[in-house]
Amino acid sequence: MTIILGLVITLVCMLGGFMAMGGHVEVIWQPWEFVIICGSSLGTFVIATPMKTIKDSGKAIVEGFKNAVPTGREYLDVLGVLHTLMRELRSKPRNEVEAHIDKPEESSVFQKFPSVLNNVELRTFICDYCRLIIIGNARTHEVEALMEEEINTVRHDKLKAYHALTAVSEGLPALGIVAAVLGVIKAMGAISESPEVLGALIGSALVGTFAGIFFSYAVMTPLATKVKGVREKKMRLYVLVKQTLLAFMNGAMPQVAIEYGRKTISAYERPTIDEVEEETTGGGGAAAAAA
């Protein structure tokens, strides 16, 4: 909700300052100028953006408003499911472990950690590399390179919405000028009118320039930056999985391997060692909490 708070602060300061200077707020209300600017921006966005990215941009905006970054519970769930799977890999026959990997939605392991179970992309990422570990022929440095390549690909896809929104924000000032020029053309058509009428028409035209710059730098650019921040934080879950599984492949015990993953979490969001130990040794997950 910080986006809404920020917009409120911006509008109050902007409009309050304008009124303090003696300006009349009703002059800024030029709905057709806003229609020209916002409608043209939407049209160029649709022209330049694939439909999948358009849909994902809507989803990304919702995530930005909700600040849907991974929570401490999600980090603990990922560490918990990795710890459980690594213990299974060390102690159980191959066919029993494969049952968890092949049908994770039916797996008792994943069902203990609902945030991982419901995150299909992350769940698939975990299962794919656990399957490589089960096969046993992959070298650690090769798996690391493959993981890094996939993470970069996922990051590129996740940030397409950010780049699309940034392109819109960069075009808004120019579209504001377009709206202003159209307003000036209208004003020139009334050149024979009184100075009061002509002044009002020119003032309404200049609102287009103001609106284009305002929507760009006070709305779209901060929103795009917020989307990028949320999506980048979601990518930390993949890095966590990568470092944990690589440590395990290099011979670390499960409890030690998840410490490698824990250290990839930002310091102010990172669960403590005690929290992770309680999660992994006590069964963890929402199911354990409910019990």
Image: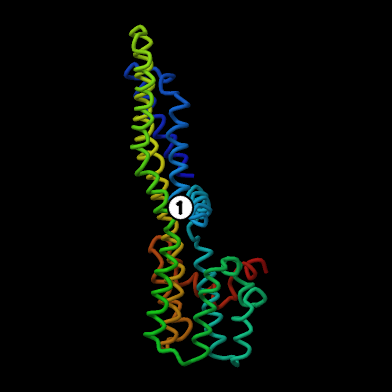
Q: In which quadrant of the rendered image does the C terminus lie?
A: bottom right
Relative to 120, residue 203 above or below: above
Callout 1 environment at 10 Å: few (<14), some (14 to 19), or many (20+)? some
Mark 1 residue type: Thr
Relative to 185, residue 11 above or below: below
Query: Extreme top residue here?
Result: 194
Residue at 40% from the left image edge and 37% from the top image edge:
215
**Dot 1 corresponds to which residue?**
49
Q: Which of 57 and 113 is in front in this view?
A: 57
Q: Nearer the viewer, residue 11 or 172?
A: 172
Indicate left or right for 83 with 226 as reference. Answer: right
Residue at 34% from the left image edge and 35% from the top image edge:
213
Q: Describe the colour scheme in one phrase.
A: rainbow
Indicate left or right for 276 with 169 as reference. Answer: right
Residue at 44% from the left image edge and 58% from the top image edge:
231
Q: How many marks?
A: 1
